[in-house]
Image (tube, rainbow, N blue to C red):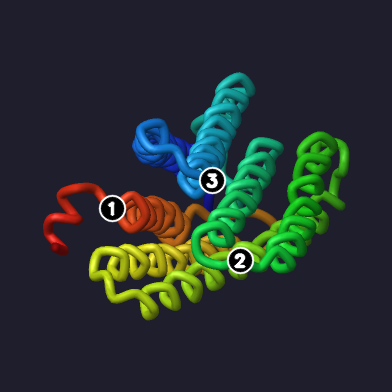
Amino acid sequence: MVTSWNIFLAMIIEFAITGIMLMIFLLFLNKYLKNKSRPRLYMVYTMLAWTISGFFTAIGRAHFLIQLFLTNQLFTYNVTAYIPDSFLILTLACFALANAFYMVFIQDFFEKSKTILIVYIIFDSIGIIGFLILAAIFPFLGTSAELVFTLLWSYQAILTLFVSLYLSVSAFKNASKTSNRIFKHGSQLIGLSGILMVFINIMFVIDEFIVPGFGGAFSIFYYLGWFFVIVSAIFVYLGFILPNWLRTRWE
């Protein structure tokens, strides 16, 4: 069961994760400003979209708790599952936007297939537009909101899975082609970040379907999903930016 305590705990953890994501974004931004390149710029955009995604999630929880307080339900709220709202839908829209920038990064840094990139951007744009429209009309859809949200959420989960696997394959393939130990290990870390993104999907899917009906359960799988978000971001930072202390160790 989901209570106001579950929502409060989720909000605290989401704000904390958003803070960590903000720090990783600033590290990427600092590196880009010192040595500008297109791949670094795309990763700055990716991390910014991820950070905004976490921010929308946490703000949504805070807004919901305030509504419970104003309606005197803060200590009595008890439901089967947390029902998504416009904030959560905007979270998914930002996550989809991050995937788009991630895909551009992959093509610019590892692969050179404009066809794959264009096709993916088209499909991803459909999802982003769908989420934005849904966020605007969600309160007015009534019972049909469940079906629309589930379809869009499933659609984006498939696209995220594709980006994750594509990143891993591209990174590990690049690692196998270079004899430079530093760049080999860096590509391997980026590849591992893609694998962790697969686990992000898996954890959130399990949490979504762990209870019957519509909405998340705030189970351990939900928090594991956000944990994998952080670890994946750290891995891609270490593998792509290659901090001096890591370079020295590998050398």
Crowd class of label 1 (few under 14; some 14 to 19; many from 20; radius 10 Å): some
Q: Residue at x 53, y 48 (%)?
A: 2
Q: Is residue 55 visible?
A: yes
Q: In the rendered image, which quarter contains the C terminus?
A: bottom left
Instruction: Measure the C-alpha gap from mark 1 to mark 2.
Output: 23 Å
Instruction: Measure the C-alpha gap from mark 3 to mark 1.
Output: 16 Å
Amino acid identity at mark 3: Tyr
Residue 242, label in figure: 1
Crowd class of label 2 (few under 14; some 14 to 19; many from 20; radius 10 Å): few
Q: Measured from the top left, where is residue 229 in percent x and y?
A: 43, 54
> For residue 123, which quarter of the picture?
bottom right
Q: Nearer the viewer, mark 1 or mark 2?
A: 2
Residue on which disc 2 sits? 112
At mark 1, the secondary structure is: loop
Q: Is residue 210 visible?
A: no
Amino acid identity at mark 1: Leu
Q: Closer to the camera, 11 or 230?
A: 230
- Whether label 2 touches label 3, CB < 8 Å: no
Residue on which disc 3 sits? 42
Instruction: Measure the C-alpha gap from mark 2 to mark 3.
Output: 15 Å
Q: Does 93 sit above or below residue 193?
A: above
Q: Does 22 sit above or below residue 100?
A: above
Q: Measured from the top left, where is residue 195 in percent x and y?
A: 44, 70
Q: Nearer the viewer, mark 2 or mark 3?
A: 2
